[in-house]
Amino acid sequence: MILLEKILQSQGFGSRKYCQQLIKSGAVCVENGTIHDLKQKFKPQNLQFSVFNIPYIYREKVYIALNKPKGYECSHQATHHLSVFELFDEILLNRGLQCVGRLDQDTSGLLLLTDDGQFLQALTNPRKHVPKVYRMLLADPIDHEQIETLQHGVELRNEKGVFAATDVIKRAENELQMTIHQGVYHQVKRMLAAVGNKVEALHRHQIGQLSLDDFKENSLEESNWTYLDESQILAAKNQLT
Ligand code: URA
């Protein structure tokens, strides 16, 4: 059992003092009853509470899928564009939400965010080779030779090793889908440049087992985000072990 003020603080509502003030002012309800007593303790697991009538569920850590729009940078201090963190409220940001890997400013699609440091490190560890599926529009029609070269692997300037794509699918004359297994800077754009083409628009459709299609029911439209459910979190964690 934990003090309510500590629970609120862990969920991003602010300093311990501020959380005490929230409780004292009658802004916090637990299971539909207003709590004024600072000494009351609760079991945090699955605790349902509200602050200023907005309902919340206690989450030890948060795991979020965002359908990132173009024009947003994956950094807290975005310089030339908007930051993806502007798409989240302060309570989540207070928890120390971080992007799991990065997408370029002009790339759209699936981006995971979390405040679980271990998960973040594991998923971004280059040795884990988590597969990522990208769809792209190309400046020139893609030909057989380019596809073969991508599958065979290309070298990228200032990077060690060979970068190959798997599951390369020509979706239309100028449209390609492919899976990559590393995640170096501008990898997809540089791989396509290496075979003599040019990426005009890039979209990430899938990370590991998790695809944007899995969120159809939540209608994960561009700019929208959702919490991963237990099975999606487990699937993401399992592929790391
Ligand atoms: N490869 C790129 O070139 N850009 C991205 O945003 C992701 C992968």
Image (spheres, rainbow, N blue to C red):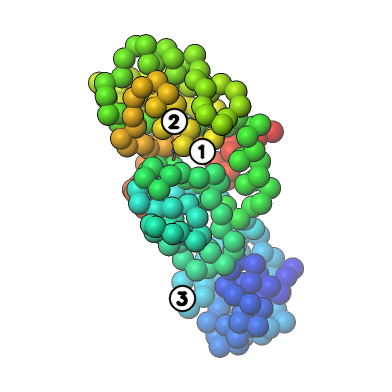
> Which residue is under mark 2?
190
Q: Give the mark toward the camera: 2 or 3.
A: 2
Task: Assess disc 3: are there few (<14), some (14-19) or many (≥20) residues with their C-alpha within 10 Å of its C-alpha.
Answer: few
Q: Is label 1's Cβ within 8 Å of ligand 1?
A: yes
Residue that appears at 36% across and 22% down: 196
Q: Position of residue 75 (x, y in %)?
A: 50, 55
Say what secondary structure mark 3 lies in: loop
Residue that appears at 60% across and 23% down: 161
Asked if residue 136 is positioned above or below residue 232 in the image, the reply reads above
Say what secondary structure mark 2 lies in: helix
Amino acid tagged 3: Asn
Q: Position of residue 84 (x, y in %)?
A: 44, 56
Q: Give the farthest residue toward the bottom.
A: 25
Residue that appears at 55% across and 85% down: 26
Cα separation, mark 3 vs mark 1, equals 44 Å
> Which residue is under mark 3?
53
